[in-house]
Amino acid sequence: MDIAQENNRAQGEAKVKSVSGKKRDFNRAKVWQIGFFAANNTATNAYMFLMMNVAYFATGVVGLGTVLVSTIITGSRIFDGITDPIIGMWIDKTNGKFGKFRPFMVGGYLLMTAVMLLLFFTNQLVPDSLKMPYFIVLYALYIIGYTFQTAVTKSGQSVITSDPEQRPLFSTFDISMTSIFFAGAGIYLSNYLVPKYGGWNSEGLFHEFALTFIIFSGVLTTLAVIGIWAKDRPEFFGTGEVKKITFKDMWQILKGNRPLQMLVITASTTKLGQQVATNSIVMVMLFGIIIGDYGMFGILSAIMLIPNVVIAFFGTRIAGKYGTKQGYILSTWAAIATFVGMFLLLVIGDPRAIAMDNWGFMTIAFVTLYVIGNGVRTLSGGLVIPMIPDVTDYETHKTGRYAPGVMGTIFSFVDKMISSFAQTIIGFSLALIGYEQLFPDVDTPYSDNILWVTMFLFVGTLVFAWVASLIAMHFYDLDKDKMLIIQNELQDKKGEILAKKDQ
């Protein structure tokens, strides 16, 4: 068995060496094109961050119950997953005057903007009997617009660059911009908006919140459209040979593409854990109740900005050198270690000793673990995205089907079906300890129940997700060497097809 494995490895290395000289044929992008296109993800993250806080608006301003709101949000995310394959098919059938991807980027932003204005400025004004259905309809429309734009983040990478060494560069920009955004958003919320309006249950808070993020997302969407503009053309679509994709093909793709299956498990479990752990309610409980200083959340968001960018830079460099899969595995193990460390620190130690004006052991240890933990957690999640165009190219290599929209939205469908339970997990966990009508706020008294529920939501869900994702990665075989072989063979096939067309 060892001899056979050694022979297989030697053959694989020889094949890699035999094709490595063809790297000049790869579709490569200018660095600024990758950076601008990565802004698309931050643009949708802005709306996602806004809607992560919608539970406070729905309960404190509109007047809906906590369990009801959590259930609505869960149901809406299931609807989100169902719409994904339909929109993915739509993207793959689109190739008009403005390309395949740009219409969905612009259309998604405009639809989400209209929903935000209606939701946060009019939902509280409708009659009580209509508040819930009005909220549900607007949330459903937001999901459609969100899917329009996020589907392009996943599928559009396949046309930006096909070089396995260049693809992780997307994560460098994505993670850096995401880190800057969430740091700024954390400061904006905890150190400006919440103190300005005296808490979360304020209509004015959400008015200002929504308008600010609408403008911010609009600027980033514009940059992303510019970034993909030159690449949104048929000559960059797969091998250049068009194959019609049907709904039947979607099932065949999911059933026959093992790397896609493993990546879906990895991404969906990780996203579920991250959406639970980073939810604003969990942050309020961790910083506002357990530590006793919600303002520290904003301060740490600023402190971890530079470390996050540094970790992203070196992490994606490692991924570029050794492969995205290996970079993901290393960053995930680092994330597990730091979050388990935070759990032990907060449970065994005294969280009330953590304070920005008390730099003893507890503060130093917590800040260190929190900053490094969030950096490697962001890196781990960010490295999933460049693997999506890899599984897209694997499918094209295997079957000849170029379906970036379908691939990206199949990925999102299962991802969202699982991660849709994030708000429900939070809602029911808090309902079990007595918070059925209003979520805990910064003035809620500390209790052991709050501590253990927070530890479960902040650490437990993440560790479970990471263990599941590492198991899935064991069966994901698209490492750097295999992707190099795939890309060169795709280039050969594209050359043959183009030569035939020229005859």
Image (spheres, rainbow, N blue to C red):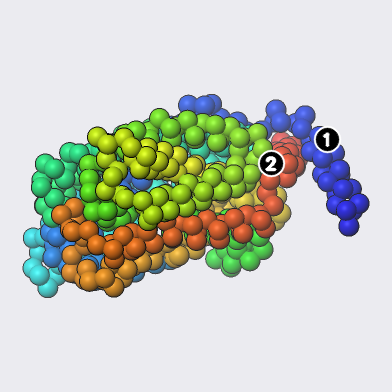
- In the displayed structure, 247 sits above or below 340; it is below
Please state which of residues 257 and 383 is positioned toward the viewer in this rendering. Answer: 383
Quarter-of-image position of residue 216? top left
Which numbered marker is on residue 480?
2
Check the picture and name the quadrant holding the N terminus: bottom right
Who comes first in sequence, dot 2 or dot 1?
A: 1
The residue depicted at 15 percent of the width and 54 percent of the height is 443
Q: Inspect this view and state whether residue 40 appears.
A: no
Q: Nearer the viewer, mark 2 or mark 1?
A: 2
Please state which of residues 341 and 286 is positioned toward the viewer in this rendering. Answer: 341
Q: Inspect this view and state whether residue 491 appears.
A: yes
The residue depicted at 38 percent of the width and 33 percent of the height is 305
At label 2, counting other C-alpha atoms closer than 10 Å, the crowd grade (few under 14, some 14-19, many 20 or more) is many
Coordinates of residue 19 in the picture (x, y in percent): 79, 35
Please state which of residues 472 and 45 is positioned toward the viewer in this rendering. Answer: 472
The residue depicted at 16 percent of the width and 45 percent of the height is 194
Check the picture and name the quadrant holding the C terminus: top right
Which type of secondary structure does the marked residue at label 1 adopt? helix
At label 1, counting other C-alpha atoms closer than 10 Å, the crowd grade (few under 14, some 14-19, many 20 or more) is few
Left or right of 373? Residue 209 is left
Residue at the spot of label 1: 18
